[in-house]
Amino acid sequence: MNIKKYLVVLPGIILAFVLYTLSQGFNNILGIELLGYEKSPISTAMIAILLGMFFGNVFKIRESFLKGLDFTQKYILKLGIICLGIQLKPFEFLEFGKIAIPLIIICIISVLIVIKLLIKKLKIPTRMAYLISIGSTVCGTTAIMATAPVISAKKNEVSYAIANITLFGILSMLIYPYFANFYFESEPLLIGLFLGTSIHETSQVAAAGLIYDQQFNSPETLNIATVTKLIRNTFLIIMIPLFAFLYNRGKTTERKYSIKDIFPYFVLGFVAMIIIRNLGDLMYSNNYKWSATIEGIQLFSKIFLTMAMAAIGLSTNLKEIKNMGYKPFVVGFISMATVGLVCITTIELYLSYFN
């Protein structure tokens, strides 16, 4: 067993944890000491993202931290999402899912149609448009990286698409929790569906849900947003083969892809945690130790997610985004706006039909 292989990620993980601790400290000073609230109304996750972006762009992050920051974004984030499952029960998962799936399908189809029209108007490469569209509709960077090989995307096209998703994802992550609270009049189900469907990355949805929870004291919204996003992630299984077919049709060879490689397995961990919660409630109802265990896992979930937010902030290079050119960002902005508007319209139609 090569211990050095594992130790190399420690500096970045520690840095993310330090930023989490710093963010929590700032939050307590601002919200409790200065503003006088019993519990700070400011989101620790938002402070972590903004602090990360500040330090990541003012100072050069040392090479020794990069692997750990990448590990935090990929794996500690997923661990945090898995731990979130302890807050849900199976029937809640099914209840959100039956509403979320039609909403996700409508949003995906709408964005694909809009981007198809934009390719002709703005004359950007088809491959880049495909990458931006799957990143906007399914699961951000993960979807882009998984799709790139099957459509023979170039490195600069992948970079543009990822920068695009990062920029608009961060904007929506910071703005949408407040907009949704105003527009949907503090209704957890509708806000959770909106955040889970309209924001690009899994990490960004988790951050937006956490910001909303911490700002408006609504763990239910965080649960619904997370479930909606995890359902959305599984659409990779359909979308990547579809994009491979659309891009390669008429050509003699098609790129191969593997469902095993693209399936988001941490979704299974999330579902397993829901089952554990349900079984625990049946066997240990009204048991102090079981209640304390649930609270502990919930706390770890928020720590892991906030660490991931700090790592994302540290890894966001604003200069690189600035130098990417404007056309792909027009597509990205229109994609973000389309998903948001279609989501709002579909939710309004759902309300008018069922109420």
Image (spheres, helix red, strand yellow):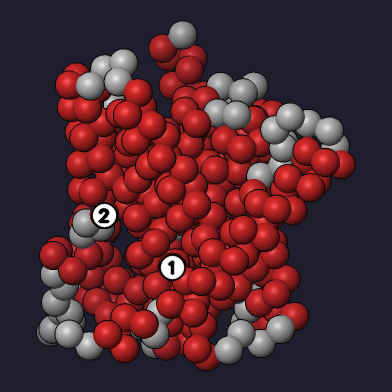
- In the picture shown, does residue 154 fall above or below 308? below
| In the image: residue 185, left or right of residue 132 | right
The circle on residue 266 is 2
Depth check: 189 or 60 in front?
60
Out of 28 and 226, give the one closest to the viewer.
28
User: Residue sitting at 23 percent across and 21 percent down?
Assistant: 284
Q: Amino acid at mark 1?
A: Thr
Q: Residues within 10 Å of mark 2 (few under 14, many from 20)?
A: some
Point out residue 32 in the picture as x, y percentages from the top left corner: 78, 38
Mark 1 residue element: helix
> Mark 1 = which residue?
72
Looking at the image, can residue 125 be seen?
Answer: no
Dot 1 or dot 2, earlier in sequence: 1
The image position of residue 130, as x and y in percent, is 39, 68
Residue depicted at x 27% and y 44%: 270
Question: In the figure, residue 58 lies in which quadrant?
Answer: bottom right
Q: Quadrant of residue 4?
A: bottom left
